[in-house]
Amino acid sequence: MVSGERKSGTVARGGRGYSWGMDTTIDLADTRALRTVLGRFPSGVCVVTGRSADGRTVGMTCQSFMGVSLEPPLVLVSVMKTSRTLPHLKDGPGFTVSVLGEGDEAVSAMAGSKAEDKFEHIPMTTTTTGHQFIDGAPAWFACELEAWVDAGDHDLLIGRVLMAGPADCDRGPLLFHRGRYVSLADEPAGPVSADLSGLLTATGPGAWF
Ligand SMILES: Cc1cc2nc3c(=O)[nH]c(=O)nc-3n(C[C@H](O)[C@H](O)[C@H](O)COP(=O)(O)O)c2cc1C
């Protein structure tokens, strides 16, 4: 039970009733339960790649990605300290984030594995900056490491985006929710409310991604 006033009840959202209560908390020492609750936040799926000192392509699947800043262009990935890729991302010449598209489950599984040569059978393009992105990625960001932050059992890597693309793409994303791959419903849930769209563009027209 969380201290303070007890709040619980049912509120209608999206035409359905959802029960909720502040007394249904989890034990934060139970990392499996915490993972389950965190997994209710849906995300896209990315592959972060870099190069080892001997020139090999290294990388890993990563759902913890976000855009951080437009000016300057910054993105962030959160990488487990146990990842073999992490030292190469921190000490290498740079890294690339490739957003995976619908149907890319096998690419996600391979990059998320502990295989030795994960990228042998994944077609990639090398940019003029020497970064590599996965062919067909709905979005990719070639970065140099701007900063990193020690964050518990993960490191947060902030990348300054040197190149990004493609300029146009209508391929849908691969999504991850509750520990499973899912795809976007064909119909959007609904229009963004007038209030919310005002909030999202509060820093100026088009300043939100
Ligand atoms: C869908 C999916 C999402 C993942 N997201 C992350 C993530 O955000 N951060 C992370 O450190 N690992 C994440 N992983 C796990 C790594 O990809 C996995 O541990 C991988 O084996 C690490 O490889 P490495 O040790 O060769 O770097 C994810 C895996 C999958 C399949």
Image (spheres, grey):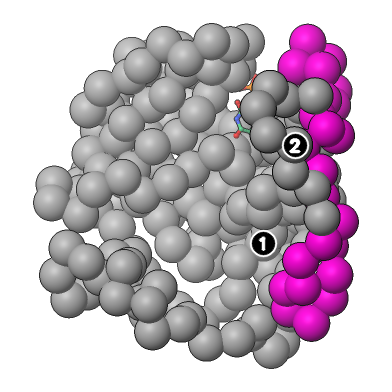
State left or right for residue 209 relative to residue 171: left
State left or right for residue 88 relative to residue 37: left
Toward which corner of the image does residue 152 lie, by quadrant? top right
Secondary structure type for disc 1: loop
Task: Mark 2 or mark 1: name the one nearer the start of the chain.
Answer: 2
Residue 26's spot in the image, x, y percent? 82, 25
Give the class, few, some or many, for how many residues have Cα within 10 Å of label 1's Cα (few <14, many ≥20): many
State left or right for residue 69 relative to residue 72: right
Q: Which residue is mark 2?
A: 6
Give the class, few, some or many, for how many residues have Cα within 10 Å of label 2's Cα (few <14, many ≥20): few
Tag 1: residue type? Leu
State left or right for residue 72 relative to residue 24: left
Q: Residue at point 68% right, 22% down?
A: 3
Q: How many marks?
A: 2
Quadrant where the C terminus is found in the figure: bottom left
User: Does residue 95 lie above or below 192 as drawn?
Assistant: above
Q: Which disc is residue 17 wearing? A: none
Tag 2: residue type? Arg
Toward which corner of the image does residue 189 lie, by quadrant? bottom right
Residue 110 can be seen, yes or no? no
Residue 92's spot in the image, x, y percent? 33, 20
Question: Residue 131 versus residue 160: which sits nearer the camera?
Answer: 160
Residue 202's spot in the image, x, y percent? 22, 66
User: Does residue 10 lie above or below 69 as drawn?
Assistant: below
Question: Residue 26 versus residue 186: which sits nearer the camera?
Answer: 26
Quadrant where the N terminus is found in the figure: top right
Magenta highlight range: 10-33
Q: Residue at point 68% right, 68% down?
A: 102
Q: Which residue is mark 1?
A: 174
Query: Is 20 contained in the magenta span?
Result: yes
Residue 194's spot in the image, x, y percent? 38, 84
